Amino acid sequence: MDLGIQSIHSQALQVLVAGKLYTPDEIAGPVAIVLEGSKIRAIWRDTNAAEARQRVEHLFPGLAVDVTDLGTWRLAPGYIDLHIHGFRGHDITTGPAEDTEAVARDLPCTGVTSFFPTIATTGRTETVEQVKNIATLAEKRPNASSEILGIRLEGPFISYDKKGAQYGPAIRKPDPAEMRQLAEIGNGWIRFVDYAPEEDDKSQLLASLVELDIYPCIGHTSATYEQAVQAIDGGARHSTHLFNAMPTLNHRAPGAAGALLTDNRATVEIIADGIHVHPRMLKLAIAARGIHDVALITDAVSPAGLPDGDYEFVRRIIHVADGKVCLEDGSLAGSALTLDRAVRNMVAFGASWADAIRMATLTPARIAGIAKRKGQVAPGADADLVVLDEHGLVRGTWVNGQRAYFVDAHLSKA
């Protein structure tokens, strides 16, 4: 499929040749992906590196085009994290603007090419400051870094009883006026807000979020099944880490989890670290909702990617050991998960590579309303790509056509 590629001369061209492609559907290789600037221009099936160079020389005589031979390694869409608080010691919730910039710079090593920086519950002034900082950074669009797609607020309008590791003193009642102020300060960058429906008097916050074109997410909630369905009726279209920070699923009182498992109008996300949710409950969620409605997230906090030890998270000490992050009372406090690990975990739990990759790419893109340009390898989509070895380890990452991370050992120019 050339799609008029003979006429392209305006932007830099490069060709990546892989042993297999996930679009996220699996396509046997060899296969070549043609990039034009920041976009994917074409997919050449059954084309090895030598054949790709011959084709380039025929189509573009005299034009310098990089052809990168990835050998047996695979190409997939860049991963998208809908829910992340920090990475490698950098904190999105309370850190300076440079922390979020560092997270964006470091995430490509985990295959993440775009993300929603997530601000946990903090005081009103602190929340305003972080929204300003992240919105300013998002508009800058730093090069060779994971792209900020929007801001997510995990609170402050949540249930105190289901706060988990959220900072209790900063939790407040849903306030449409405060929400409108934050939306204005965020200049359109706030895209998701997690809230507890049962705390929302007359669903006023929900109505404001819908009016502001922000995705209301059911989470950190004590909502009954009926209250959760009422929120979905009112426009709630996503949820916060299914099964965690909500009532336990019960056959007589299904609660929010029961509503989210059975109502296809709201999508779900899940932390696949084997700690937050038992693998069999992951299987239940996928059986109930399917891979198109279940997104993998990390919910990672700043110690993710660092050695085990004690760290700080919103004025409290958290302990990291063997992949588990806890407050001093033993409550889970986010995760140390990376999205590439989540994909590998899903395969270990029984999913196919194509399905696991979809849950980290096209599914979150569709949830966020950006599937036309993100989450898939297709002509016209953004050139966000991750290179994986046969074990699913990240060996290279392209963000908007720029190589942001790579391991030299296996990459060569044809």
Image (cartoon, helix red, strand yellow):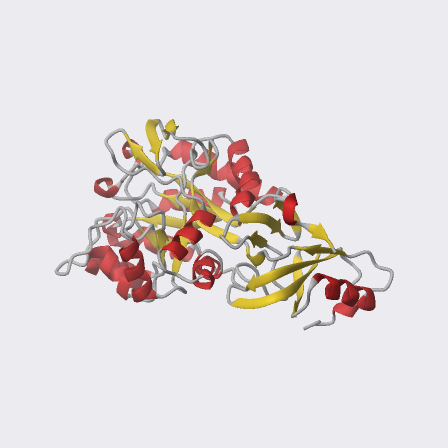
Counting every numbered tag in the picture gives 0
Give coordinates of residue 231: x percent, y percent: 28, 58
Q: Note whether 312 is above or below 25 in the view shown.
A: above
Residue 216 % position (x, y): 36, 54
Comparing 269 with 171, the one in front is 269
Name the spot of residue 243 as percent of width and height, x first: 27, 52
394 relative position to 270: left or right: right
Q: Is residue 39 above or below residue 121?
A: below
Against 152, is 258 above or below? Answer: below
Q: Residue at x 34, y 58 (%)?
A: 236
Q: Quadrant of the N terminus?
A: bottom right
Residue 148 visible (yes or no): no
Image coords of residue 359 (percent x, y): 43, 59
Residue 185 is left or right of residue 166, and the answer is right
The image quarter in which residue 143 lies? top right
Q: Answer whether residue 293 is visible to the viewer in this image.
A: yes
* Residue located at (21% from left, 41% from top): 161
Which of the image's four quarters has the C terminus?
Answer: bottom right
Q: Residue furthest left?
A: 252
* Image-based side of 148 in relation to 30, left or right: left
Spot the residue most to the right. Answer: 62
In this view of the protein, which residue sits in the foreground, 29 or 305? 29
Asked whether 24 or 316 is in front, the reply is 24
Looking at the image, residue 169 lies above or below residue 25:
above
